[in-house]
Image (cartoon, rainbow, N blue to C red):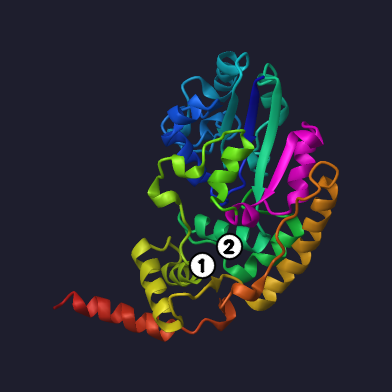
């Protein structure tokens, strides 16, 4: 029996780690009946989105195009007893100018015996925080106080779904409820062998995660400390903060608050507003999934492990002093 799994993200849920690891171990996985196609020049299958999203980097593009590549995958594997994993968080974009046509993708993959859409979700405050830091790589992002109200109102941020019920609405227009799998990021990370081990088991692969050769120490595209990124962004506006400035801010924060400090981009009041709104939306999501995924729920927003919210940030003096010392040391 042939099966194709569309792993659509979401962004900042270890997608790059999964893609890098599966690409690097593709031959070993194929021996176990799991196919992770090596397509193009990047480890994620973002080229499968380019026909619908012309704004993606040219390096993602595939010679056969997205539609041609989907058709070629069906031709190569739909008559074999394998599970094909296609992984790109770009498949989950909300922006109509960048969103794929799932109905057309389903038609292109219709020769497979089974199709599944797999999506990993995390609490919205974490997702927003990580997305803010990702956006920061390309330029100055909106300041955090300007994020909360628009995100609550629209349910999206920079073309990404933040209200996951909206994502489910879109998927259910094409896929049956039992063809959709949602998973909670925190629960997968808590697995004994982490999200990679869970993914292997979900794909029906008997290999333990330890059998796979790790890439980047087992974690790719890791976000910087939230308040270090935020402080650096403020100082660098309107340009993107350089990595050295973020690293300096993180050094100062850890020196002042300890190595175990856990920072949050949002003030405590902003955190509570996001939690109140999206915990309720996530409860509705779990209710809608209960018939096919009775154990699924997105982890509730939990402030207990946060030790420093943005409104309690008190490191400006230390940061200014460190930067001054760094500059003066250039004359030594």
Q: Is residue 174 above or below residue 195?
A: above
Examine the image and state in which quarter residue 271 appears: bottom right
Q: Which residues are magenta?
A: 161-190
**Residue of label 1:** 226
For mark 2, give the secondary structure.
Answer: helix
Left or right: residue 26 compared with residue 48: left
Which is nearer the N-term, disc 1 or disc 2? 2
Residue 181: which quarter of the image? top right
Image quadrant occupied by the N terminus: top right
Instruction: Inspect this view and state whether residue 284 appears.
Output: yes
Residue 220 visible, this orientation: no
Going by the image, does 253 lie left or right of 112?
Answer: left
Decide which of 59, 109 is in the foreground and name it.
Answer: 109
Vertical arrangement, residue 315 with respect to residue 226, above or below: below
Please state the horizontal and vertical placement of residue 142, each as a whole percent of the image: 57, 63
Residue 127: x percent and y percent? 62, 58
Horizontal side of residue 275 vs 20, given as left or right = right
User: What is the C-alpha distance between the residues marked 1 and 2?
Assistant: 7 Å
| Label 1 secondary element | helix
Q: Which residue is mark 2?
A: 129
The residue that appears at 81% across and 48% down in the rendered structure is 294
Give me the residue at 77% from left, 47% from top.
Answer: 166
* Marker disc for residue 147: none
Asked if the stretch drawn in magenta spans residue 311, the answer is no
Q: Residues within 10 Å of mark 2 (few under 14, many from 20)?
A: many
Q: Nearer the viewer, residue 275 or 298?
A: 298
Residue drawn at x 53%, y 73% as measured from the top left: 263
In the rendered image, which quarter is residue 211 located in? Answer: top left
Q: Position of residue 43 (x, y in %)?
A: 45, 36
Asked whether disc 1 touches disc 2, contact meaning CB atoms under 8 Å apart, the reply is yes
Above or below: residue 260 compared with residue 135: below
């Amino acid at each position: 029996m042939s099966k194709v799994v569309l792993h659509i993200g979401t962004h900042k849920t270890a997608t790059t780690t999964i893609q890098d690891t599966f690409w690097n171990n593709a031959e070993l996985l194929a021996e176990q009946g799991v196919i992770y196609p090596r397509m193009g020049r990047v480890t994620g299958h973002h080229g499968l989105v380019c026909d619908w999203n012309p704004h993606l980097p040219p390096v993602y593009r595939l010679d056969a195009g997205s539609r041609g590549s989907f058709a070629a995958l069906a031709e190569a594997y739909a008559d074999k007893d394998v599970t094909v994993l296609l992984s790109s968080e770009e498949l989950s974009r909300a922006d109509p100018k960048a969103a794929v046509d799932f109905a057309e993708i389903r038609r292109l993959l219709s020769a497979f015996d089974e199709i599944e859409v797999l999506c990993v979700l995390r609490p919205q405050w974490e997702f927003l925080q990580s997305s803010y830091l990702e956006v920061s790589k390309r330029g100055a992002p909106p300041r955090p106080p300007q994020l909360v109200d628009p995100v609550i109102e629209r349910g999206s941020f920079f073309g990404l779904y933040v209200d996951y019920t909206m994502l489910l609405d879109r998927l259910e227009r094409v896929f049956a409820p039992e063809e959709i799998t949602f998973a909670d990021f925190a629960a997968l990370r808590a697995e004994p062998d982490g999200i990679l081990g869970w993914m292997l088991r979900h794909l029906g692969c008997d290999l333990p995660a330890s059998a796979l050769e790790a890439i980047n120490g087992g974690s790719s595209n890791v976000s910087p400390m939230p308040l270090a990124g935020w402080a650096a962004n403020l100082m660098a506006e309107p340009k993107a903060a350089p990595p050295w400035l973020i690293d300096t801010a993180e050094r100062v924060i850890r020196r002042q608050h300890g190595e175990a400090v856990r920072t949050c981009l949002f003030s405590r009041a902003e955190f509570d507003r996001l939690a109140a709104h999206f915990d309720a939306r996530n409860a509705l999501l779990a209710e809608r999934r209960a018939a096919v995924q009775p154990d699924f729920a997105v982890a509730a927003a939990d402030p207990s492990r946060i030790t420093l919210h943005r409104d309690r940030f008190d490191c400006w003096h230390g940061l200014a002093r460190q930067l001054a010392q760094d500059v003066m040391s250039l004359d030594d």
